[in-house]
Amino acid sequence: MTDDHNGLPVLGGLGHLAEAVRAHAAGQGLYLRWSRGPAFDAGTTSRDALTGVTLPGLSASPLHVGSWWGDRSLRLWGGAQALRLQAPAGAAARPGRPRWLLAGREVARGPDKEPLVAPERAIAFVAEEALRRGDGW
């Protein structure tokens, strides 16, 4: 982990992301959000970029390890998550846009079938270099 960003730690490598997932019940209720950060996203709604419709939660990518994964290596699972971090669906996935982890609960699905999450707390930012280095897996 590196120095904090707006009061949150910054996960500098995918190994740090794996530890965050392990520490949060295999990622249950843990999501990745692409936005300027929790201060910008204050509240529990967001707006669809294409239509302008208010959505009942923040669009985010789930990070939980499904029960179907069994006792397989989290290193292997992490490779798939690294791909998700690099190329998520949706208009918010622009190069250079910050990524951050939040704990929350899914309240609905958005227009691209993405989870819409009611945030409970911000966990950390994910550093851009974590996507390029691929360390820790």
Image (cartoon, grey):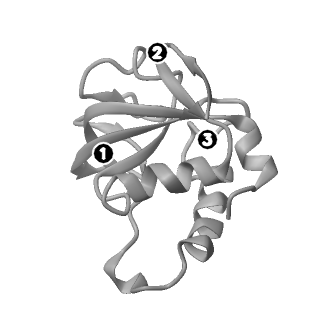
The quadrant holding residue 22 is: bottom left
Asked whether 125 or 89 is in front, the reply is: 125
Q: Is residue 114 visible?
A: no
Q: Where is residue 120 in the image (x, y as percent from the top left)?
A: 23, 34
Spot the residue most to the right. 133
Q: How crowded is mark 1: few (under 14 residues within 10 Å), some or many (20 or more)?
A: many
User: The C terminus is located in which quarter?
Assistant: bottom right
Sequence-wise, the earlier of marks 2 and 1 is: 2
Numbered tag placed on residue 7 in the rendering: 2
Q: Where is residue 102 in the image (x, y as percent from the top left)?
A: 37, 38
Q: In the image, what residue type sits under mark 2?
A: Gly
The quadrant holding residue 123 is: top left
Tag 1–tag 3 contact (CB < 8 Å): no
Q: Where is residue 36 in the image (x, y as percent from the top left)?
A: 53, 21
Q: Which of marks 2 and 1 is in front?
A: 2
Q: Residue at x 60, y 58 (%)?
A: 84
Q: Residue at x 27, y 34 (%)?
A: 119
Sequence-wise, the earlier of marks 1 and 3 is: 3
Q: Where does label 3 land, which residue?
A: 93
Numbered tag placed on residue 116 in the rendering: 1
Q: In the image, what residue type sits under mark 3?
A: Ala
Q: Left or right? Give the position of 58 relative to 63.
A: left
Look at the numbered disc 1 and give the secondary structure of its residue: strand
Asked whether 75 or 95 is in front, the reply is: 75
Vertical position of residue 112 compared to residue 69: above or below: above
Tag 2–tag 3 contact (CB < 8 Å): no
Look at the numbered disc 3 and give the secondary structure of its residue: loop
Q: Nearer the viewer, mark 2 or mark 3?
A: 2
Q: Position of residue 3 (x, y in %)?
A: 62, 21
Sequence-wise, the earlier of marks 2 and 3 is: 2
Q: Residues within 10 Å of mark 2 (few under 14, many from 20)?
A: few
Task: Tell me the CA gap for discs 2 and 3.
Answer: 23 Å
